C-alpha cells in the first residue's frame, strides 16, 4: 500500500489508532494496493466488513481515504472503490496539536482563575460558588467539602502547554 507515511512513527500510529482503533490500523497496514472495494479489503485483511466500512468512513471524513463510485451499466449497481492517501497527515497532526494546545490553555485558564472544593470521599469537585450553594456539604454523600489545592495540576498543565508550544 502506498500511503506515503511511516506507519511505524509513534505519533502517526497513535493518531491513527485514536481515529480508527487497532483493527482499523490493521486494515490500513494490510490494505491492498490500488483502488479496491470494501469487500476486497475485508477479504484481504481479515477485518470484519462492518469494521472496514466504519474505518473507511472515518478515514474519508478525515481526508485520508478517497472514494470513487462506479455504476455497473448492466445492473445499475454502484460499486465504491477506495484507496488511501496519507499525504496530508502532517497537516492534520498540526491541526490536532493546535486544537489540543487551545484546549489545554483554556483549561489552564479555568484552573488558574477558580477556587475548588472537593468531597473527601471523592464524590465531587465543585467551584467555590457551587460549594457555597451546597453550604460546603457534598451533594452526593453529605460530607464536609474541603479546599482543593490544584497547584500541582496547574503546574502539570503549564508543562504540557510549554512542551507543545516548543515543538
Image (cartoon, rainbow, N blue to C red):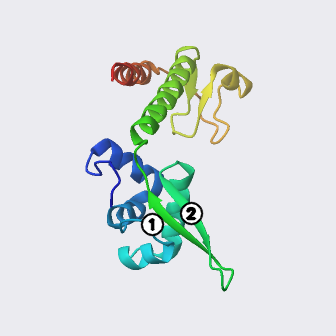
Q: Which mark is residue 111?
A: none
Can you identify the residue that label 2 sits on? 68
Nearer the observer, 31 or 164:
31
Q: Is residue 27 above or below residue 101?
A: below
Secondary structure of residue under mark 2: strand
Secondary structure of residue under mark 1: loop
Q: Quadrant of residue 164?
A: top left
Q: Residue at the location (46% across, 57% down)?
A: 20
Label pair 1/2, CB-CB below 8 angstroms: yes
Q: Residue furthest right?
A: 133
Residue 7 in the figure: left or right of residue 92: left
In the rendered image, residue 123, in percent from the top left (x then y), is placed at: 57, 40
In which quadrant of the rendered image does the C terminus lie? top left
Q: Quadrant of residue 43?
A: bottom left
Q: Residue at the location (58% across, 28% down)?
A: 145
Q: Residue furthest front?
A: 73
In which quadrant of the rendered image does the N terminus lie? bottom left
Nearer the observer, 1 or 9:
1
Between marks 1 and 2, how big is the CA–CA gap? 8 Å
Q: Residue furthest bottom?
A: 74
Residue 93 in the figure: left or right of residue 61: left
Can you identify the residue that label 1 sits on? 35
Count residues near mark 2 (Cα–Cα under 10 Å), then give few for <14, some for 14-19, many for 20+.
few
Q: Is residue 126 above or below residue 71?
A: above
In the rendered image, residue 125, in percent from the top left (x then y), is placed at: 57, 31
Amino acid at each position: 500500500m502506498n500511503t506515503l507515511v511511516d506507519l511505524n512513527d509513534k505519533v502517526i500510529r497513535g493518531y491513527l489508532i485514536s481515529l480508527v482503533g487497532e483493527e482499523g490500523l490493521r486494515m490500513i497496514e494490510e490494505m491492498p494496493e490500488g483502488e479496491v472495494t470494501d469487500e476486497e479489503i475485508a477479504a484481504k485483511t481479515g477485518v470484519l466488513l462492518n469494521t472496514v466500512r466504519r474505518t473507511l468512513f472515518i478515514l474519508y471524513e478525515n481526508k485520508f481515504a478517497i472514494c470513487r463510485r462506479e455504476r455497473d451499466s448492466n445492473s445499475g449497481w454502484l460499486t465504491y472503490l477506495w484507496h488511501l492517501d496519507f499525504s496530508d497527515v502532517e497537516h492534520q497532526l498540526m491541526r490536532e496539536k493546535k486544537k489540543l494546545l487551545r484546549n489545554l490553555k483554556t483549561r489552564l485558564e479555568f484552573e488558574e482563575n477558580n477556587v475548588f472544593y472537593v468531597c473527601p470521599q471523592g464524590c465531587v469537585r465543585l467551584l467555590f460558588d457551587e460549594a457555597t450553594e451546597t453550604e460546603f456539604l457534598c451533594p452526593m454523600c453529605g460530607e464536609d467539602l474541603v479546599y482543593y489545592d490544584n497547584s500541582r495540576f496547574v503546574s502539570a498543565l503549564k508543562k504540557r502547554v510549554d512542551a507543545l508550544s516548543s515543538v
